[in-house]
Image (cartoon, grey):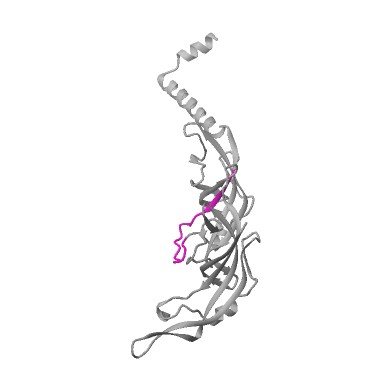
């Protein structure tokens, strides 16, 4: 004991500084890597990557090639090899032929923050609406937390039947909103639009095709309606597996089902955005 005390007395100020820094580093290491943590399962909506989306209809969602990179079991690990995040499941659907919305069911190792009374992941609050970054096997994911396991979900499922019209309004055909006849031929009654898990989102249960009306101006300036010999008015009856959020209805999580708003219908060979013209029925 006396020898130890003698050696301690020989310490110089620089030695004490080194001892203090070492002690602080040990505390920081212990705090960072050995804090009490738990796992929470969250749903992350993958937001638009850095590549600019040029689509006019809707620039949200990810590119098709990016969505194909995700698979169950992908992980993020810390410096000691411990799992910080694990991908449990994926859910996706096409918004346009080039853009797809992806949701990732992810298990996160989170830490309780006493100061804010919240859980955090890499310093980011784990709250619905919070943005989060996860590195899955060298794949950077930037997304929005849309659901947390255990948090009350007030969304209600509904089966909605609507009528929607396929319109083609452009500067070339201002006098009519009809569309090309071959599009009508390509639409098949009974065809289903599904998500990546095979669940039906939209089903085409009926199709009505009529000659399009065309506005014709006579030589004396009168506007009259005439049948267009080439173009067609196409009306679809769609059965939609929808969600009721508050007093409104949505296709999946973010596409409102309202009058005069487009819905995406993407099949392997056809992409359409028919406009809702009326509600036919709403079932629980």
Q: Which residues are magenta?
A: 41-59
Q: Residue at x 65, y 59 (%)?
A: 197
> Does 47 appear in magenta?
yes
Decide: is 284 above or below 236: above
Decide: is 244 above or below 94: above
Decide: is 208 above or below 67: below
Asked whether 180 or 60 is in front, the reply is 180
Q: Position of residue 66 (x, y in %)?
A: 54, 59
Number of marks in picture = 0
Report the residue that reaches farthest toward the left. Answer: 220
Q: Is residue 271 visible?
A: yes
Q: Position of residue 189 (x, y in %)?
A: 63, 73
Q: Position of residue 93 (x, y in %)?
A: 57, 61
Q: Residue at x 54, y 30 (%)?
A: 30
> Does 119 appear in magenta?
no
Asked whether 260 or 198 is in front, the reply is 260
Q: Position of residue 44 (x, y in %)?
A: 55, 50
Report the residue that reaches farthest toward the bottom. Answer: 219
Quadrant for residue 100, please give it. bottom right
């Amino acid at each position: 004991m006396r020898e130890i005390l003698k050696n301690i007395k020989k310490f110089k100020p620089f030695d004490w500084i080194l001892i203090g820094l070492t002690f602080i580093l040990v505390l920081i290491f212990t705090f960072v890597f050995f804090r009490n943590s738990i796992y929470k399962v969250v749903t992350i909506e993958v937001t638009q990557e850095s590549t600019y989306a040029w689509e006019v209809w809707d620039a949200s969602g990810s590119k098709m090639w990016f969505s194909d990179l995700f698979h169950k079991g992908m992980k993020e690990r810390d410096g000691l090899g411990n799992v910080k995040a694990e991908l449990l499941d994926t859910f996706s659907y096409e918004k346009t032929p080039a853009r797809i919305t992806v949701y990732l069911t992810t298990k996160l190792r989170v830490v309780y923050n006493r100061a804010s009374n919240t859980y955090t992941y890499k310093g980011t609050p784990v709250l619905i609406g919070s943005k989060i970054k996860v590195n899955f096997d060298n794949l950077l994911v930037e997304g929005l937390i849309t659901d947390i396991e255990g948090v009350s979900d007030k969304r209600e499922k509904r089966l909605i039947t609507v009528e929607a019209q396929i319109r083609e309004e452009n500067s070339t055909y201002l006098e009519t909103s009809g569309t090309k006849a071959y599009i009508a031929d390509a639409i098949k009654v009974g065809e289903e639009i599904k998500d990546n898990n095979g669940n039906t989102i939209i089903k085409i249960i009926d199709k009505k095709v009529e000659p399009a009306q065309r506005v014709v101006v006579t030589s004396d300036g009168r506007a009259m309606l005439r049948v267009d010999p080439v173009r067609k008015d196409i009306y679809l009856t769609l059965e939609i597996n929808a969600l009721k959020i508050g007093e409104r209805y949505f296709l999946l999580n973010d596409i409102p089902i309202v009058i005069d708003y487009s819905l995406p219908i993407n099949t392997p060979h056809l992409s359409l955005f028919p406009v809702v013209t009326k509600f036919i029925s709403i079932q629980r």
